[in-house]
Image (cartoon, rainbow, N blue to C red):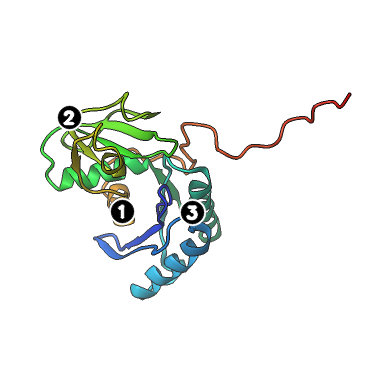
């Protein structure tokens, strides 16, 4: 599962290949849509939760709320079913799909970080991460080279050579884990900056 973008994506891998993959129809409804999508993916493959041997989730970077929903769900499933839970950088998933598609050269992955910024990392032609991820304004990290991800679509002036895919795929996340195409991480969120919401500070004294 990946909840690092406004859309939820869920997939099921049977050890050989992806047997079900779903993407939410509505944006920014992670909490409402993740559990039903998991149930639907299992149903499509004729499986039940007890058949799962591992759980994997994208750790971002991405929005605080979306990542929290996905990673709490993944850890809960792992705890209840007593199976391992793996985390993968969501940018690495995009890179793996781009490399498998034959991008043929070094490239960057840029995703939407809101606040007119992008999350960006550099990769070689095989999809191995060379640098990043960082969060930065597009103009600061602009490049004429190939850029995969939604960031290139949103900021064409900074990234004129936009390539697909646009958003991370849970199917490719599953392939990354089963085929060890990227570093497997603990299922902890990769925020890169503080969340928008914060606890209020101490009230100012009233004179």
Q: Label 2, label 3: how many angstroms apart (C-alpha)?
A: 37 Å
Location of mark 2 (residue) = 144
- Disc 2 is placed on an element classified as loop
From this viewpoint, is residue 180 visible? no
**Rendering coords of residue 186 (x, y %):** 46, 40
Q: Residues within 10 Å of mark 2 (few under 14, many from 20)?
A: few
Q: Is residue 37 above or below residue 185?
A: below
Across and down, in percent, residue 171 comes to: 30, 57
Which quadrant of the figure has residue 138? top left
Numbered disc 3: secondary structure: helix
Is tag 1's residue or tag 3's residue first in the polypeptide sequence? 3
Residue to which mark 1 is pinned? 169
Write the residue at 43% across / 65% down.
38
Q: Element under label 1?
A: loop
- Which residue was labeled with disc 3? 74
Pick whichever of labels 2 and 3 is earlier in the sequence: 3
Would you place residue 184 above or below residue 50 in this image?
Answer: above
Front residue (pair 206, 137): 206
Q: State yes or no: discs 1 and 3 in contact (Cβ < 8 Å).
A: no
The answer to the question of whether label 1 and label 2 lie on touching residues, with beta carbons closer than 8 A, is no
Q: Nearer the viewer, residue 196 or 86?
A: 196
C-alpha gap between disc 1 and disc 3: 16 Å
Q: Position of residue 83 (x, y in %)?
A: 47, 55
| Residue 205, quarter of the rendered image | top right
Could you tell me if the residues under marks 2 and 3 are in contact, i.e. CB atoms within 8 Å? no
Residue at 37 percent of width and 35 percent of height: 119
> What residue is rendered at 42% in x and 62% in y?
26
Q: Is residue 45 depicted above or below 184 in this figure?
A: below
Q: Is residue 59 left or right of residue 121?
A: right
Q: Is residue 182 left or right of residue 56?
A: left
Dot 1 alpha-carbon crowd within 10 angstroms: few under 14, some 14 to 19, many 20 or more: many
Label 3 neighbourhood size at 10 Å, few (<14), some (14-19), many (20+)? many
């Amino acid at each position: 599962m990946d909840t690092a973008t406004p859309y939820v994506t869920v997939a099921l891998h049977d050890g050989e290949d992806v047997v079900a993959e779903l993407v939410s129809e509505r944006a920014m409804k992670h909490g409402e849509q993740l559990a039903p999508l998991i149930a639907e993916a299992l149903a499509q493959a004729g499986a039940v939760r007890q058949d799962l041997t591992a759980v994997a989730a994208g750790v971002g970077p991405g929005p605080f709320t979306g990542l929290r929903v996905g990673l709490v769900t993944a850890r809960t499933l792992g705890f209840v079913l007593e199976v391992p839970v793996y985390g993968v950088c969501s940018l690495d998933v995009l890179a793996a799909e781009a490399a498998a598609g034959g991008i043929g050269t070094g490239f960057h992955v840029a995703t939407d970080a809101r606040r007119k910024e992008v999350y960006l990392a550099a990769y070689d032609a095989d999809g191995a991460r060379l640098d990043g991820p960082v969060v930065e304004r597009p103009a600061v990290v602009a490049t004429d080279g190939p850029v995969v991800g939604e960031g290139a679509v949103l900021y064409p002036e900074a990234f004129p050579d936009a390539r697909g895919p646009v958003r991370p795929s849970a199917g490719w996340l599953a392939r990354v884990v089963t085929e060890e195409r990227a570093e497997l991480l603990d299922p902890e969120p990769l925020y890169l900056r503080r969340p928008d919401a914060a606890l209020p500070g101490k009230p100012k004294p009233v004179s």
